Image (cartoon, helix red, strand yellow):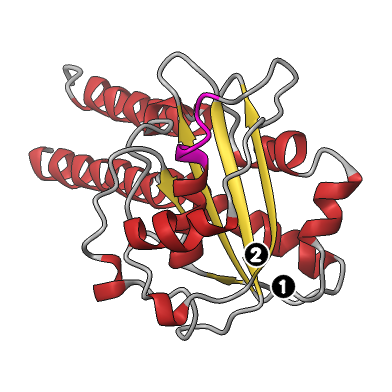
């Protein structure tokens, strides 16, 4: 019986660990999720997928970092950094090699006074009107980068940058981005989770899965420990 108990416990514990790992991978970086949703939208309209550029993503995060105090009551970002800011501030802060700085062909910037999970952020914040959808589905784009950041007890900001660049030749990060110190928010193309984004426990589906597995483990103990 003890052997059976041990094997059963190991199995259920392994399932708990697997669920945690999968959820961590899928939901640790909402910016990556936004890129996946963008590409799904484009392919649904017979447009090519965009390459996820960490350099663009990091600059998108820099963009919204500079606009954190400019979210209006109707969820509009009242902030427009100059073109020089990209080459003089955003790119150096990210470690983008300046000779590889390409052409930015479009941007979508928006905010919301509460956090929204990626599907809702996409539909209700980023492409809530025809203009946003038109930018997203522009045929000239080849690369995309997404940045997002939240303000303590304040709004969340999203930025999507598009480019006509080529993979591994435009917006290249020095030392593959290993020198970037990401203190707040997150950007696409990075393996780092959001430093102030939604934690794993806040995803209801994940909580339900783990709760169910814990319940199964409790039931197993109860059944096996009952007197014969």
**Vertical order, 188 against 71 (above or below):** below
Q: Is residue 66 left or right of residue 72?
A: left
Q: Position of residue 209 (x, y in %)?
A: 45, 34
Q: Main secondary structure of the magenta part?
A: loop
Disc 1 residue crowd, few under 14, some 14–19, many 20+, Cα 10 Å: many
Residue 91 visible to an observer of this rendering: yes
Q: Position of residue 138 (x, y in %)?
A: 81, 67
Q: Residue at x 33, y 43 (%)?
A: 20
Quarter of the figure with the C terminus: top left
Q: Residue at x 29, y 30 (%)?
A: 217
Q: Which mark is residue 191?
A: none
Depth check: 174 or 121 in front? Answer: 174
Q: Position of residue 52 (x, y in %)?
A: 54, 68
Q: How many marks?
A: 2
Quarter of the figure with the N terminus: top left
Q: CA distance from mark 1 to mark 2?
A: 6 Å
Q: Residue at x 45, y 38 (%)?
A: 65
Magenta residues span 64-69
* Residue 222 is covered by the magenta coloring: no
Q: Is residue 5 left or right of residue 69?
A: left
Depth check: 37 or 227 in front? Answer: 37
Query: What residue is shown with label 1?
Result: 141
Secondary structure under tag 2 reads strand
Q: Residue at x 62, y 53 (%)?
A: 160
Residue 210 visible to an observer of this rendering: no
Mark 1 and mark 2 in contact? Answer it, CB < 8 Å: yes
Query: What residue is shown with label 2?
Result: 162
């Amino acid at each position: 019986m003890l052997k059976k108990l041990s094997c059963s416990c190991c199995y259920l514990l392994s399932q708990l660990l697997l669920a945690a790992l999968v959820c961590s991978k899928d939901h640790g970086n909402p910016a990556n999720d936004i890129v996946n949703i963008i590409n799904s939208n484009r392919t649904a309209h017979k447009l090519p997928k965009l390459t996820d550029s960490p350099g663009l993503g990091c600059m998108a995060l820099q963009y919204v970092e500079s606009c954190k105090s400019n979210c209006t009551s109707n969820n509009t970002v009242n902030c427009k950094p100059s073109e020089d800011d990209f080459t003089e501030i955003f790119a150096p802060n990210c470690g983008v090699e300046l000779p590889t700085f390409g052409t930015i062909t479009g941007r979508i910037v928006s905010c919301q006074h509460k956090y929204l999970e990626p599907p809702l952020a996409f539909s209700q914040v980023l492409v809530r009107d025809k203009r946003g959808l038109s930018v997203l589905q522009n045929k000239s784009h080849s690369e995309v980068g997404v940045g997002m950041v939240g303000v303590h007890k304040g709004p969340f900001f999203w930025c999507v940058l598009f480019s006509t660049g080529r993979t591994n030749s435009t917006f290249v990060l020095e030392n593959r981005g290993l020198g970037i110190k990401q203190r707040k928010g997150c950007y696409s193309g990075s393996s780092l989770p959001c430093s102030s984004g939604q934690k794993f426990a806040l995803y209801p589906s994940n909580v339900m899965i783990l709760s169910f597995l814990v319940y199964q483990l409790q039931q197993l103990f109860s059944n096996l420990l009952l007197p014969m």
